[in-house]
Amino acid sequence: MFDKTYDVVVVGGGHAGTEAAAAAARCGARTLLLTHKLETLGEMSCNPAIGGVGKGHLVREIDALDGLMARAADAAGIHFKLLNRSKGPAVRGPRAQADRGLYRQAVQALLRTQPGLELLADSAEDILLDATGRCTGVVTGTGRRIGAGAVVITTGTFLRGVIHLGEERTPAGRVGEAPSIGLADTLRRLGLPMARLKTGTPPRLDARTIDWAALEAQPGDTPPEPLSWLTERITNPQVACAITETNEATHAVIRANLHRSAVYGGRIEGVGPRYCPSIEDKVVRFADKGRHQIFLEPEGLPGGPDGDVIYPNGISTSLPAEVQAALIATMPGLAKAVILRPGYAIEYDHVDPRALRPTLELRACPGLFLAGQINGTTGYEEAGAQGLMAGLNAAALAGDGPADRVLTRAEAYTGVMLDDLVLQGVSEPYRMLTARSEHRLALRADNAGLRLTERGIAWGCVGTARATAFRRFGAAVTDALAWAHSEAATPTQFAAAGMAVNQDGRRRNVLEALALPSATPEALEALFPRLPSLAPAVRTQLEAEALYAPYLERQAAEMRALAREERMGIPPGLDFTAIPGLSTEMRQRLAAAQPATLGGAGRVAGVTPAALAALAVHLRRHSAERFT
């Protein structure tokens, strides 16, 4: 029946697909990664950067579970920046600009050295189902029938993808690569709820034609802070970015040609990302704003194959190529800039993520998982985190275990994202923001390993090197916190060190001292001589604990309450029409969302507290009846 069989087959070689395949293989599943071209594995289709505010949190969480993205970014990184450094640690976002070619090479090297993982250049054109409707494999473009215990689809923008450049329309998943039509038709035949979304990319500029002397340079951090917890130091040469901006002349060019934009000319039906709008959207939606900053970001190291390519972050567009050239020429430093490749918009199919379980398995098709832009998200980091979780669950299911690898909103930004997707769905491409989390003080980028690595060890996806190093670090943090709680100084000692405190006779410990407005590094180290000997990462944990301690105690109580709700599971297929006290509307909303827990039901849009109370009573009664 099958030409070959694997435990897990992953379709797609982007950020979701590579993380899914590597995660499944790390868990011991015999895994096949199926992609159109092996040489494009790990391709950065748009911005050559990883991380940022919110997104950097996801990268650190992927890394905490031994994923690829942070390690690849560190191997390819040429400009590192900790965003929001002047703000609290909860909203700081690590970000790395990467050499596009080096990133691709790093991902491919990690995949090729992963035991249990095979790579195959072919397309997936159909999905195989057994008599019960369970997914059992795929049919490739060359006619191979490949069996699988579980399949993960990560097609990005390839499902019936169409590139829009002015009045031109080109079927493509990205420039130069054909869209996935057969698989899109298969998903529609399964009866899945599908819609169209769009995203875009800016033109690429020739670095040699830019007047860099007229622009404000933006150097990276010194020393650069790695994204991966396992990276000891960054070895690549570092480059500077620069800033330019649009002006009234730019906006005039855009307004005069809006009818030629694919978005405003009515040729695109898909909805674009609100938090990463095209330059046309910015000019229309923010008509009162006279300028928009544009960051000029190198796509590679000088002398390398991408060293002369500049990504102008902030002018994603679908205007015709000649209009793009005209608007770019109006900006400082870009009067003579040459476009190497025009920007474009791309429209593609996606599946309504409310059709998924929290594990990213389709409810209507057991054994079939979806991850990445196919679920209505945008961004490498969102895709990578979904891919990792889908790969873990696919491996668990293929191994005859329950596919129950789930992170809650209280544990991870990954959990926030998946909960948002499967309960709320999307009306536009979903992007991770720190504001989406009600527990963001506890879910920091700096403590991702402390939150998640032990969980990854239990799931079997964390290798020995990370597990050993993490446990050593965790022990150091535990020891430092115990010392910081117990070591204290008197008001007299504080005053002698030059720190103002009330002369109330009360001793204050290290954490209290770190939180004082009058604290300086010199005074703190004079009071507590052990502080300078702490590793920087350990000291970071102490400082965050000191800053957020009162708030974290309150959040911990909220998280315990949330955990109680999350533990109250809702049986699959529960007949909501049979629950007394629920209105027809509440029954319809809950039946459509199919939440897995009482906590999830509370996050379904429009579900009232009264409906939750009725549901809780029913669940408790149902639970009691099972044990009588």
Image (cartoon, rainbow, N blue to C red):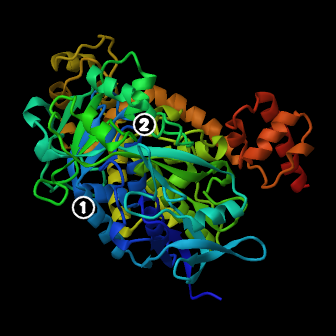
Q: Nearer the viewer, residue 387 or 458?
A: 387
Q: Residue at x 77, y 49 (%)?
A: 570
Measured from the top left, where is residue 7 in percent x and y? 56, 77
Q: 10 Å neighbourhood of mark 2: few (<14), some, or many (≥20)?
A: many
Q: Quadrant of residue 490?
A: top left
Q: Which residue is mark 2?
A: 260
Q: Say which residue appears at 89% left-offset and 41% top-offset.
A: 579
Q: Residues within 10 Å of mark 1 (few under 14, many from 20)?
A: many
Q: Nearer the viewer, residue 193 or 83?
A: 193
Q: Quadrant of residue 185?
A: bottom right
Q: Quadrant of residue 338?
A: top left
Instruction: Say which label, 2 or 1, has the lower sequence index.
Output: 1
Q: Please state the horizontal and vertical placement of residue 521, each as a whole percent of the image.
A: 18, 28
Q: Which mark is residue 135?
A: none
Is residue 255 at least partly visible in the picture? Answer: yes
Where is mark 1, residue-wise? 101
Q: For the view shown, which residue lies furthest in the left direction?
A: 213
| Kind of residue at disc 2 | Arg
Question: Residue 33's x, y, as percent?
Answer: 46, 73
Relative to residue 586, is residue 182 depicted above or below?
Answer: below
620 or 603: nearer the viewer = 603
Asked if 562 appears above or below 454 in the picture, the reply is above
Q: Is residue 412 visible?
A: no
Figure label count:
2
Q: Residue furthest top?
A: 503
The kind of secondary structure element at disc 1 is helix
Q: Looking at the picture, does residue 517 appear above or below residue 347?
A: above
Quadrant the N terminus occupies: bottom right
Front position in the image: 511 or 236: 236
